[in-house]
Amino acid sequence: MTEIEQKRRPGKILGVLALLSVAAGLYFALIKAPPDAYQGEVQRIMYIHIPSILTAYLSFFIVFVGSCLYLWKRERRDDILAYAAAEIGVLFTALTIVEGSIWGKPTWGVWWTWDARLTLTALLLMIFVGYLMLRSLIEDPERAAVSGAVLGIIGFLDIPLIHMSVYWWRTLHQPPSILRPDKAPWDNVHPSMLIALAINFIAFLLLYFYLLSLRIRVGETEERIRTKTLEGAA
Amino acid sequence: MRWTNIDREEKHGLPEPDRLLLWKDLLLELRRRESLLAMFFFGALLLFIFHFALDVRPEKAADMAPGLLWLAVVFCGTLGLMQLFQAERENRCLEALLLSPIDRAVIFVSKVFFNLILMVMLEIVIFPLFWVLFNLTAWDRLPMIFLYGLLGTVGFCVVGTLFSALTLGARGREILLPLLLLPMLIPVVLATIRGIEIVLQAGDFSEALPWLHLLIGFDVIFSTAGILVFEWIVEP
């Protein structure tokens, strides 16, 4: 077995686990869990809607941590991590918005409404699409890494402020029905719904880390090609 | 000579290196008049276009005023930001500036002040012009709105200066800058427009307090963050 194949092995195992858990998640969400008392079958979107946005939040937090670490220690791998997390975070945020739209049309009667959480999610998407654009438009890789890290930090700091401002501006979103202060989760939600949600959350996490590991390997390969080319030029 | 004038004023206001850099920028602007003139004309043009697009009737003008007014300021400001580091880009002046024995934060602070002065001059012209063109009658509320707008302007200048420097090395910088800046400025845009709305209708600040706090918080957080990270943005 070559060195590269050995490196790929943990990633492959993660990939298989992700595939299996996504299949299990789909089974529990589409078949095992009962339809919602008020919303009917369309509520099943919730089983992927909540995991995708939570994964996206996790991703932007990883961008923030990677950016801080890079500015502090200047290790290439922290920057590769931040860049990879930003890309996948954008993917999951976009997914969340699409899922939400599909759910919103039959439930609220509109594809889009100017509610606080929707607006916040769309703005998050814009900020991190901006991050990706900034990185791709700066040619010098060192500069791109530093600029990206600064933007990753500034963007993350801005999230609570954006949240506050759009929240004051308006609120119409479905109030949280699982984590409610007055009731324990198992009192107002059918247990099989919670199980389906939990399994899907684990599935999304596994899928997320699998994609992240793939994207990090792409970043490392790019890095190797760059240093080899530099050596060749010298 | 101008230098000696500056030396004598050392006791108060900005520290000397900041003042020198600020003076350099102001002098350049005074001689070239590139940014400010363009901003003035673009602002006036926007007010005309807003009026054509929305066909604002006098009785509706007061409802639309806060949004339109602040949009004009933000768009003109963005135009100004593209020119902000122009002098430093020519002849590798930025490298020379970085070689000089001053703290990098000084460069940032002086640029923010320069940008702020430009924006305030723009607002001094645009705000009354808006009142005239849109037939607003509440002239007595103009100073208060101007003061409130100043808080939003500080937030705009701080983040704008930061991003103007951040995109210096990027291709297609003119397109990238507004794309990065506008989503980031949403708290400032919302807080300023809602606040101006309240002041215009009620005539005092008390209802606008949450927005006022948000603006102050934004200004403080990003001034601090800007001073801390600017060093990394411009490093050669």
Image (cartoon, coloured by chain):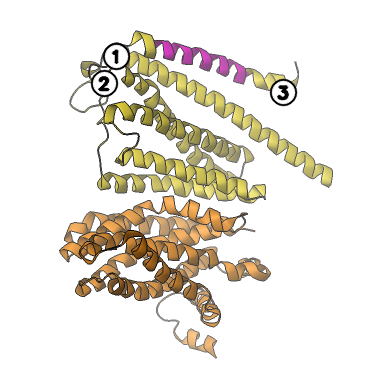
CA–CA distance between discs 1 and 2?
8 Å
**Residue at numbered disc 2:** A39
Contact (Cβ within 8 Å) of mark 1 with mark 2: yes
- Gap in angstroms between the C-alphas marked 2 and 3: 50 Å
Which mark is drawn over residue A35?
A: 1
Which chain, by letter, is orange?
A: B
- Say which residue appears at 61% left-offset and 27% top-offset: A214
Q: Alpha-carbon distance for marks 3 and 1?
A: 47 Å
Foreground: B194 or A58? B194
Above or below, B231 against A63 in this view is below
Q: Secondary structure at mark 2?
A: loop
Judge by depth and name the residue closer to the eye, B108 or B65. Answer: B65
**Circle 3 is placed at which residue position?**
A4
- Near mark 3 (Cα within 10 A), the count class, few <14, some 14-19 or many ≥20, is few
Whether tag 3 and tag 1 are in contact, CB under 8 A, the answer is no
Name the chain under label 2.
A
Q: Which residues are magenta?
A: A10-28
Would you place residue A28 above or below residue B178 in this image?
Answer: above
Pointer 2 and pointer 3: residues touching (CB < 8 Å)?
no
The three-letter amino acid code for the residue at tag 2 is Gln
Q: Is B126 drawn above or below residue A209 in the view shown?
A: below
Q: Nearer the viewer, residue B91 or A13?
A: B91
N-terminal of the two: label 2 or label 3? 3
Q: Residue at x 67, y 22 (%)?
A: A7
A131 relative to B169 in the view: left or right: left
By secondary structure, the bulk of the magenta-drawn segment is best described as: helix
Task: Tell me the amino acid under the disc marked 1.
Answer: Pro
- Please name the residue shown 71% across and 19% down the image: A5
- Chain ID, mark 1: A
